[in-house]
Image (spheres, rainbow, N blue to C red):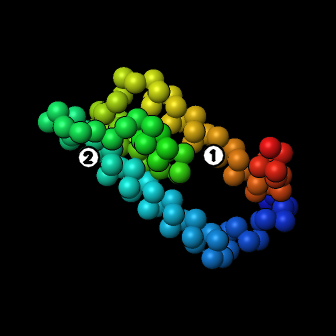
Amino acid sequence: MFIHSPNFKGVFCLSPFFIGLLVWLAAVNFAAAVITIYDKHQAKINRWRISEKSLLFLSILGGGPGMYFTMKIIRHKTKRKKFMLGIPLIVLAQILLAAAWFIGLDPVSKF
């Protein structure tokens, strides 16, 4: 079943927007994983750390999946509910916004 949307054709063909979005998501998730590993390393040697606000902001920018799975793999901040619940909620909100846009709603203009 296909969803008939004014955005459907432009999203899944190899449009510049879609390619740019994929490149952005790949880069920000890679950066999130690297920064999470760096923060874990800094924690082990009692050095300067990345602030929690910065880590959550990176998740808001699209790096949530990379950060979340890296945290689970290296066991970093897994006891902090702010991250173990917050990051999946951020990703869920991003998915819902993307789905609303995809089916033709404009969730952002309502605010």
Q: Is residue 63 left or right of residue 99?
A: left
For residue 71, the mark is none
Q: Residue at x 80, y 43 (%)?
A: 111
Q: Earlier in the sequence, mark 1 or mark 2?
A: 2
Q: Secondary structure at mark 1?
A: helix
Q: Position of residue 102 (x, y in %)?
A: 76, 57
Q: Are marks 1 and 2 in contact (CB under 8 Å)?
A: no
Q: Residue at x 64, y 40 (%)?
A: 93
Quarter of the rendering containing residue 101: bottom right
Q: Secondary structure at mark 2?
A: helix
Q: Position of residue 86 (x, y in %)?
A: 52, 31
Q: Which residue is mark 2?
A: 38
Q: Is residue 20 left or right of residue 106?
A: left
| Residue 64 is at least partly visible in this image | no
Q: Position of residue 79 (x, y in %)?
A: 36, 23
Q: Residue at x 45, y 31 (%)?
A: 83
Q: Is residue 85 left or right of residue 94?
A: left
| Residue 107 is at least partly visible in this image | yes
Between tags 1 and 2, which lies in front? Answer: 2
Q: Nearer the viewer, residue 32 or 68?
A: 32
For residue 94, the mark is 1
Q: Residue at x 79, y 65 (%)?
A: 7
Q: Position of residue 23 (x, y in %)?
A: 50, 67
The residue carrying pointer 2 sits among few (fewer than 14), some (14 to 19) or many (20 or more) residues within 10 Å by Cα, namely some
Q: Amino acid at mark 2?
A: Tyr
Task: Relative to 70, say whether 52 is above or below.
Answer: above
Quadrant showing the N terminus: bottom right
Q: Amino acid at mark 1?
A: Gln
Q: Is residue 61 left or right of residue 46?
A: right
How many tags in the picture?
2
The residue carrying pointer 1 sits among few (fewer than 14), some (14 to 19) or many (20 or more) residues within 10 Å by Cα, namely some
